[in-house]
Amino acid sequence: MEFLTSIFAAFYQFGDAFAFLVLSACGLAIIFGMMGVINLAHGEFIMCGAYVTVMATRAGIPLPLSILLGSLVAGIIGIALERLVIRHLYGRPLDTIVATWGVSLIATQGTLIVLGSTMQGVGTPLGSFVVGNLSFSTYRIVLIFAALAVLGGLYLLFNKTRFGILARATIQVPHMAEGLGVNTRHVYALTFGLGAALAGLTGGLYAPTMTMVPTMGATFIVEAFVTVVVGGADVFLGTAPAAVVLAVVKAGMTSWQGQLFGQIALLIAVVIVIRLLPRGISGFILKERA
Amino acid sequence: MNGRMKNVAFAAAGSLALISGHLPTAALAQEGEPIKVGVLEDQSGDFAAATMVKVHAIELAAEEINEAGGIAGRPIELVIYDTQSDNTRYQEFMRRVLQRDQVDVVFAGFSSASREAYRPIVNQFDGFAFYNNQYEGGVCDANMVVTGAVPEQQFSTLIPWMMEEFGPNVYTIAADYNFGQISAEWVRNIVAENGGTMAGEEFIPLGVSQFSQTIQNIQAAQPDFVVTLLVGTAQASYYEQAASANLGLPMASSVNVGQGYEHKRFTPPSLANMFVTTNYIEEVDTPASADFLERFRAKFPDEPYINQEAANSYIALNLYKQMVERAEGSTDREELRSVIAEGDVCFDGPSGNVCIDPKSQHMSHTIYLAKVEEDHSISFPTVWEDIKPYWLGDAGCDLTVSDPSEQYTPSSPPTAAN
């Protein structure tokens, strides 16, 4: 039983780290991978989703609906941002970094001024369960399945729907797609909105487990960027395998030596992967395939 | 460090500034000319939730003092900058208030990292700063007055009480920077002195918000209680996550509740069974506290919580007023320090009577043991009256004799030569 408990505990911790990495990174990965835009306001979309979720829950809306609402609001703001700012900066990656960083500063400080330095959370639902002599939070199992569901949903979206085909066509050869009648501006706006909505979903999902402050998005940023850098430009071939590798490293080291070494190991793993695979895991896989 | 060489160099470089500003301040201090107080506190960024209230407390104290005729007939003028929870901002603004704004005294700092970032600058320009925050102790610096509580006040009371109540096996989780490391060392020593054992110790980098594995490590070590020395809003997510995993262990802390009012921000019962030693929180039920709260709320009706640092900041400005008035209106630091050296600079404020210790320039405190109940209300199982900041003096720091401008820890105390 002792042995089974530690096996389960290891899987739980791996799953927990995996879910955090996937959910942190997927919105960023879509926007970077599909559009080549490095979105430094990613953390603020997460914060936006979390705030909307908590406010909706406190207004009496059930938590699952609130989370979807948080995602929706973040997505709409994302589309608006694409129309107003990002659209004018395509093909200028350095400028988009500065612009989205500015948006991020405005969003953090604006939230601080309007909503104050902190907000009461909603509390984690579903309670806990016991395996052997250890107890675990049930909600974190939900997070693991949510991460898998997001990956599955994105796969279906990009491979089985009309939007997915148009989006991939636009990303591969924009002028050809445009020549064939695809409204590429529309596709870009929707893709950016999708990335923002995924960030909002992440914020909503983690909102019950975290302190609600305007800077909360920043705690996702390191993991998000690290996962995208290791994964490369493709969500399925990059982000998912990168999250697996990093989750194993991080959960293993944290369990062995504590949080500090978990963080150090995570960053060392990134350095090693980038040294060996400069275009990330997806770049490596795609090269092998070609 | 070669103090004399340094002084000569700065005297040469800054002689103009000295001649025009520093030396004749006392002589030029005419009736009605304001006393300038620099205020460097975080009004945005990770620490803002706990520190906005410090600025308000200083504003309240300044307003009250000005209405009552100012300090020795001179009004207080506050020079306030938002340090944005950013250590480099502290350095930038500390230079600005000391050089450009020519303030008489500075009230600055929340995190120990920020204090250690600005302290060399206070020394460099020979300024006078108040650090109104609880911290890991050990700063022996004549340019600083510390009004916050220190480990011998918070841990020497808390840890033996917890061990008696819950058992001798202790697990510490602490923020991984000077505050957490040195505080954890104090806890380790006190646990050993009282015959207990450390079931484990884990340091958490600032900004980490995910604690599943840490919670499991604690469960596996089976301690009797957990000492939480977590700092910043990201790390505060620990409590919610520990509660949802049903960790169910009592917690002891020197920083929670009294600073970040986690019991107000989080959904009950995530903080239940937490024990905190603090020198003030708004739940303290005394006539002096009620009076303070009433005046505070009248000026700042939307203040989310009035914490120990608010009380310390308020007390600090009143102590400064007393020092200047006893020095016959002089704001010269050495004259103020000779007032401190008399050993009876005391103030009977919201947290009870407090006095500045001349040897360390730290402050004595009444220490309240606050317990967070299931519904997040606060009870006080016990109170320790008049706990002195004795450690620095006992270890050999005596600012009335020499000024080493160092920070000492139990494992690196002052050497005999000092």
Image: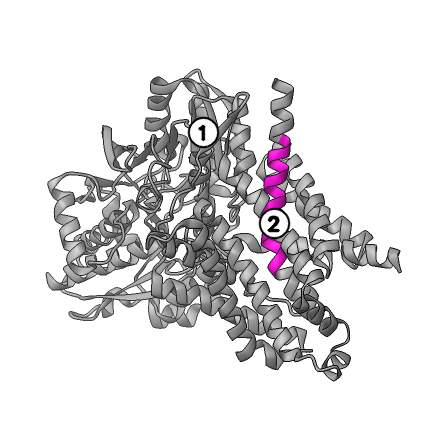
Q: Position of residue A69 (x, y in %)?
A: 45, 59
Element at label 2: helix
Instruction: Work out which quarter of the rendered image holds the C terminus of chain A and state it.
Output: bottom right
Q: Residue furthest bottom?
A: A179
Q: Is residue A18 magenta?
A: yes
Query: Which chain does the numbered disc 1 sit on?
Result: B
**Looking at the image, is A178 positioned above or below residue B42?**
below
Image-based side of A233 in relation to B251, left or right: right
Query: How far is mark 1 from mark 2, CA to CA?
Result: 29 Å
The magenta span reads: A10-27
Q: Disc 2 residue type?
A: Ala
Q: Position of residue B276 (x, y in %)?
A: 33, 34
Identify the residue shown where x is 70% and y is 44%: A244
Q: Position of residue A122 (x, y in %)?
A: 38, 47
Q: Position of residue A175 (x, y in %)?
A: 75, 81
Does the rendering let one see residue B84? Answer: yes
Query: Looking at the rendered structure, which numbered label has been put on residue B91?
Result: none
Instruction: Work out which quarter of the rendered image holds the N terminus of chain A and state it.
Output: top right
In-front residue for pair B331/B86: B86
Image-based side of B23 in relation to A85, left or right: left
Query: Looking at the rendered structure, which numbered label has been put on residue A149?
Result: 2
Element at label 1: loop
Q: Is residue A5 magenta?
A: no
Q: How is the image coloured?
A: one colour
Specify the quadrant of the image occupied by residue A50.
bottom left
Q: Disc 1 residue type?
A: Leu
Query: Which chain does the numbered disc 2 sit on?
Result: A
Q: Name the magenta segment's main secondary structure.
A: helix
Does the rendering let one see residue B181? Answer: no
Specify the quadrant of the image occupied by residue B194.
top left
In-front residue for pair A203/B46: A203
Q: Which residue is mark 1?
A: B247
